[in-house]
Amino acid sequence: MEEVKPDRRIDIRGLVCPYTFVKTKIAIEDMEVGEVLEILLDYEEASRSIPKSMEDHGQKVLKVEKTNDSDWILVIRKETE
């Protein structure tokens, strides 16, 4: 697993779908191709749906990691506009 330094971080703990996806999509749209977004979340469904949605939109999921009983870290690199 490659370790990369994120260019941007968002904390969407406390949000549920579809807000988790909307916040992630807005953040990735505001970034340049090649930049890396780190997402901190606590909604289990989003830990699966966000990576799938990002890949469906052509982005690269670098990491999906459960950090404790309730939180996940997702790391996504913007590959396309």
Image: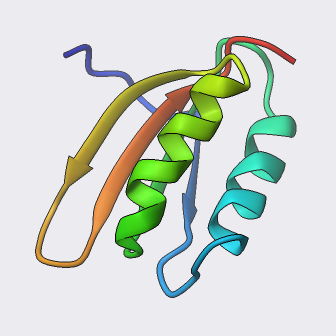
Of residues 67 and 49, which is closer to you in this image?
Answer: 49
| 10, above or below 8, in the image | below
Q: Quadrant of residue 30?
A: top right
Is residue 58 shown left or right of residue 68?
Answer: right
Q: Quadrant of residue 59?
A: top right
Which residue is located at x 51 percent, y 51 percent? Answer: 49
Is residue 34 shown left or right of residue 68?
Answer: right
The percent coordinates of residue 70 (x first, y second) are 22, 78
The percent coordinates of residue 57 (x first, y second) are 73, 25
Which residue is located at x 12 percent, y 70 percent? Answer: 68
Of residues 10 and 17, which is closer to you in this image?
Answer: 17
Which residue is located at x 40 percent, y 45 percent? Answer: 74
Instruction: Determine the residue located farthest toward the bottom in the rendered image.
Output: 14
Q: Quadrant of residue 75?
A: top left
> In the rendered view of the protein, which quadrant contains the C terminus?
top right
Is residue 15 shown left or right of residue 72?
Answer: right
| 18, above or below 47, in the image | below
Is residue 1 shown left or right of residue 50?
Answer: left
| 13, above or below 5, in the image | below
**Colour mode of the rendering:** rainbow
| 63, above or below 46, in the image | above
| Label tally | 0
Instruction: Determine the residue located farthest toward the left in the rendered image.
Output: 68
The percent coordinates of residue 42 (x first, y second) are 37, 75
> In the rendered view of the protein, which quadrant contains the N terminus?
top left
Which residue is located at x 68 percent, y 58 percent? Answer: 21
